Amino acid sequence: MNVRFSRKWFVGGVASLTAAAAFAFAPVAVKADETFPERRISIVVPFNAGGSADRMARAIASFLPNHLNDTPVSVVNRPGGSGALGHSWFLQQPDDGHTLMVSPVHPYMVSNIIRGQGDFTLDDFTFINGQWQDYYVLLVNKNQPFQTAEELLDFIKDNPGEASAATIVGDGGHLLTLIMMEELGLPADAVNFVTYDGGGPMRTALAGNQVTFSVIAARGSDVIRDDVRALALFRTEAADDWEAPLINDILAQYEVEIPIIPADLRTLVAHASLRDNHPERLETITNAYKEMLESKDFQRFIGNSAIGGDWLGPEETAKRLKSYNEIFARYADVLTQ
């Protein structure tokens, strides 16, 4: 595949991300702000209600008050532009710690920046924790005739333009589909891409058999498990939650191979300026949130709700974002063509 490298953004963006994380979370003595929080905390979700990031945000909103002086927490959905409008709107809110965000920073924020959507960079945000990591899976509705990925790929090759794919423009599933098609010698219009602004509407379309297939975040799709069939996993090893062949084992039959790009890293985010202007508030939020994640009540809830609840911490979150962005940046031109 002839793919040009787009490194200008990557070098500056990722380097600054790593430096900011190292600076922001180095051990320092911070005096608590006993007046914080002063009012309700809002969590911005840059997608429609019903998606995985929205469900994660609402779980936090339900449990965080128990660990933050009973401060009420609400969720504000600001969809549009594959996350770009919500990311921009968040930055316009006061940076005093009363507005946070839950976003799949990888891939959406990264894709927004690469494709020139929104007037922001990674430097504008503080990434508190990547709570819920995912991987991609190829799903079809159970009423579709395709029992294997090979049957679907052969249908696309023989009937260009007839298969439809649910996608969010610029996300990893969109990118993987484009790369796979290019490797198979198929033009981009061999598939009819039907675009949505959030995982919730995408999964509704899949569950309702309104589209042929989707390359979509696997763990976030557990909510439609009864309505869909998994045809391929975009992983290097088997998974314990979805059973299907690995995508590169399937593509080997066509003598091609594609990169494995991790799916959504759903992250709790604050303003970068909060770190500089109110480090004591950032520490209060971080400590309360970590305590919430580790509480028995929250762990019990997410175990029954198919929501991730990991504590990576800011440094590991930045490390993962750096590695994922490096992969994503290699294929920037595929998304912007």
Image: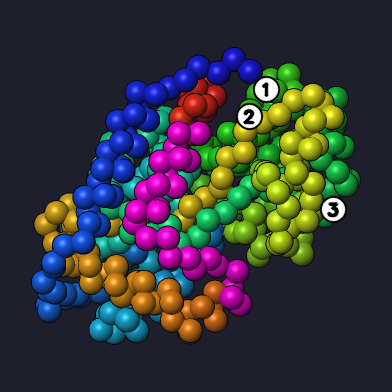
Q: Residue at x 36, y 77 (%)?
A: 291
Q: Residue at x 41, y 41 (%)?
A: 322
Q: Position of residue 270 (x, y in %)?
A: 28, 57
| Marked residue nearer the N-terminal end (3 or 2) | 3
As for residue 90 lying within the magenta part, the answer is no
Please, what secondary structure does the residue beneath circle 3 have?
A: loop
Please, what secondary structure does the residue beneath circle 1 have?
A: helix
Please, what secondary structure does the residue beneath circle 2 have?
A: helix
Q: Which residues are magenta?
A: 303-327
Real-space CA distance between mark 2 and mark 1, rounded to the nearest whole angstrom: 6 Å
Location of the N terminus (image quadrant): top right
Q: Residue at x 50, y 34 (%)?
A: 327
Picture disc at residue 38: none
Labels 2 and 1 touching (C-beta < 8 A):
yes
Picture disc at residue 143: 3
| Marked residue nearer the N-terminal end (3 or 1) | 3
The residue identified by callout 2 is 178
* Foreground disc of the pair 3, 2: 2
Of residues 260 and 102, the one drawn nearer to the viewer in this rendering: 260
Q: Amino acid at mark 1?
A: Glu
Sort mark 3 into few (<14), some (14-19) or many (20+) by Cα contacts within 10 Å: few
Picture disc at residue 182: 1
Q: Position of residue 226 (x, y in %)?
A: 77, 64
Q: How is the image coloured?
A: rainbow
